[in-house]
Image: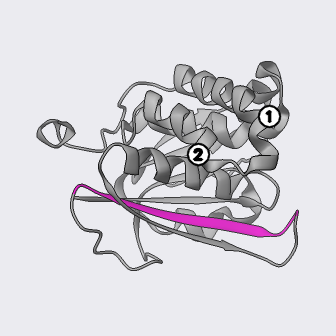
Amino acid sequence: MERELLLTGIGGQGVQLAARVIATAAIAEGRSVQMFGSYGGMMRGGNTDATVVISDGPVEAPPTVGHAWSAIVMHDQFAPPILAKLTPGSVVVVNTDVCSSRPDPAISTVVNVAANEIAHEVGNRLAASMVLAGAYAGATGLVSLDALTEAIAASLPSYRQKTVEVNVAAVRAGFEVAPRALVPAWPVEARA
């Protein structure tokens, strides 16, 4: 079984880091993973998207997908193309502090998270993407909280290792605000 996750936002929000952390956590849990990042030439303010495909067997999806089981949406500006790819029964985690875009409620379950506010409360407003990654893990069970927090240090470059603690706090805070296994990623028999 494969699960697709699309992430979108603007450059500087941590979309690529969130994708890398989720992918690293899935690998640590024995899943097969494919990740593809896409971003404009600007450091901040341009479009940034990522695709993560996680499987309990070999990954069969191409590096870009035409449909997705889930999404993390950090900003309105580039949300419509991502939301258009969602399949019935999908789950979407939305940063409500800066994003008013929502998928069709007949297609997707929406998890609303005030990610910027929560990140500010844990000590770094730039950790909003980690809040959303934690909320995503809580709502889907795609990866465990322990694997997600352990993946942070492995995913950050050496010059950003000083932010591990605040990013772990952000992931935990996001996990705590999300409803548990709202849309389970794996059937019970596949979670072993």
Quickly name the residue at label 2.
154
Question: Where does residue 27 sit, x and y in percent of width and height?
Answer: 39, 51
Amino acid type shown at disc 1: Lys
Q: Within 10 angstroms of label 1, few (less than 14), some, or many (20 or more) residues?
A: few
**Residue at the (39%, 25%) spot, across then down:** 180
Q: Is residue 47 magenta?
A: yes
**Residue at the (37%, 42%) spot, across then down:** 142
Q: Is residue 110 magenta?
A: no
Amino acid type shown at disc 2: Ala
Q: Quadrant of residue 34?
A: bottom left
Say which quadrant the N terminus sits in: bottom left
In the image, 32 versus 75, the foreground residue is 32
Question: Where does residue 6 sit, x and y in percent of width and height?
Answer: 52, 61
Q: Secondary structure at mark 1?
A: helix
How is colour applied across the structure in the image?
one colour
Question: Where does residue 18 sit, x and y in percent of width and height?
Answer: 62, 49
Numbered range of the magenta stretch? 44-56
The first of marks 1 and 2 along the sequence is: 2
Q: Residue 162, labelled with which disc?
A: 1
Left/right placement of residue 53 relative to residue 38 reads left
Question: Where does residue 50 sit, x and y in percent of width and height?
Answer: 59, 65
Q: Is residue 12 above or below residue 160?
A: below
**Residue at the (72%, 52%) spot, across then down:** 157
